[in-house]
Amino acid sequence: MEHTPPPFFVRGPAPLVRLAFFASLSLTLLVLDARFRYAESLRSVLSLAAYPLQQAARLPVAVAEGVAGYFTSQSQLREENAELRARLLVAAQGAQRFEAAAAEASHLRRLIGAAERIERKSIPAEILYSGRDPFSRKVILDRGTQHGVRAGSPVLDEIGVIGQLTRAHAFVSEVTLLIDKDQAVPVQVVRNGLRAIAFGGGASGMLELRYMAANADIENGDQLVTSGIDGTYPPGLPVASVVRVQRDASYTFARVLAQPSAGVERGHYVLVLSSEARLPPYPEEAASERKAARKGRPKKKDADGP
Amino acid sequence: MGPDRPQYILLPARASTVAASFAGALLLDFLPWPDLALAPDFVALTLALWCVRQPRLVGLATAWALGLLVDAGNGVLLGQHALAYSGLAFCAIALSRRILWFENWGQMLHVLLLLEGAQLVSLGVRLAAGAEFPGWSLFAGPLAATALWPAVTWLLLIPQRRPIEIDENRPI
């Protein structure tokens, strides 16, 4: 700023002072948000302010879809109808078998005295847009606390898990995808029941199974489903299939990469499961340890390992 | 707007035009972009334009508020874009007299530096918060935004170019 105005033109504080003020304000907010998570209420208010614009941004796509739908030919519709009917038939058959199996399972669980699994409600939602942030993998859904979704719920598509709802605002909510670097899912190998934790691989779009012993019984093509031991994800949802296993004698752990089963980065419509699972309380010791850990270092909400 | 070219006397910018352009830019940012690496940040571009053209109307406070809105809308760390946009607005205002002397290419060069600088601030914040470096495609977005600079300038100055009364005998 080589041209500072003469003092008789009143223009408020000097630009450098203003920059220092706003920069320190931003830095304070950043620290409050990243380190202590105190800024959530401000974030909700701001997201409410951005909501009309988000809805308006959806409009062109909706209009294009509407126009395209208007010009869909009848033969296309008939084909699609037939296909959907066939799929419904298959699904109905699956649902019947599932009902029978669920009844049998609950009967058996009652016989052995295990806690009954409660049905989880599911809320269908639409993906508005993917978060404009190259550092993380998030999508924004058009359902918020007003529609009954809660932070922490698992989010699925028609094939399997795509992520976890990490922040719920009034009308929209944010889903952290499985492949986000900070996201973790407890999984289980279908073939032999081996438990593991799948971490997001970031930009590669893959999942990584960390801390698997080098001699762990895991092979290419193994299907991974949620194990359900964390209480967040219900057990048995498809997560990924193993595509590469590297065992190197010089490392303690094997390097296992898995491809997500669900359309984590595709898809348009998703299902939010409610996470109101009835869980037994934590044992005394573990609970106090957990509290101490929380106090000492605020745990990241979205890193959700067991 | 060099000295040897014809100059247009523009009408004063109205605050409503500026507000509408920012709303439009936010809307474009919230569109579901298929490829995020190449998607230009329209808010930063519009902000740079108004800071260069109307430094008395649009300042650091506007930039900071817009940054917070973008942060909340995208679910990133609160303050990340606010910091980047404040810096961008400061540099754009400081350089505003200089930039307007250049032709399109010179202006675009300056704007490219401003936008890449803002991106760099964002990157610094995220790296400090523990993210990993997402790759060099991060710096492709500002390139795309810079390419849009002449078009956006032309578009956003339309309301100011309109004559109040048309007079055949007057050159402007």
Image (cartoon, helix red, strand yellow):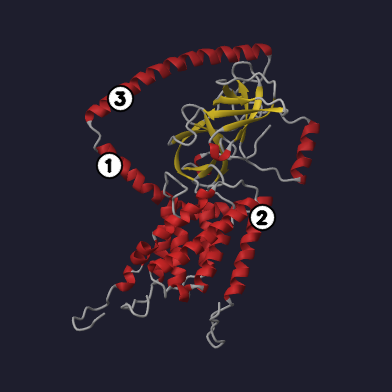
- The residue lying at 22 percent from left, 83 percent from top is B170
Residue A186 in percent (x, y) is at 64, 29
Q: Is residue A56 above or below residue A65?
A: below
Residue B26 makes an appearance in the image: no
Label 2 to label 1, Cα distance in Å? 46 Å
Q: Mark 2 highlights which residue? A: A32
Label 3 to label 2, Cα distance in Å? 53 Å
The disc numbered 2 marks a residue on which chain?
A: A
Do the numbered discs 2 and 1 sit on residues whose CB atoms are within 8 Å? no
Q: Mark 1 highlights which residue? A: A67
Disc 1 residue type (three-letter):
Val
Category of crowding for the residue at label 2, using alpha-carbon neighbours closer than 10 angstroms: few (below 14), some (14–19), many (at least 20): some
Disc 2 residue type (three-letter):
Leu
Q: Which mark is residue B123?
A: none
Category of crowding for the residue at label 1, using alpha-carbon neighbours closer than 10 angstroms: few (below 14), some (14–19), many (at least 20): few
Q: Mark 3 highlights which residue? A: A81
The disc numbered 3 marks a residue on which chain?
A: A
Could you say whether the residue bearing mark 1 is in a helix, strand or loop? helix
Q: Nearer the viewer, residue B82 or A241?
A: A241
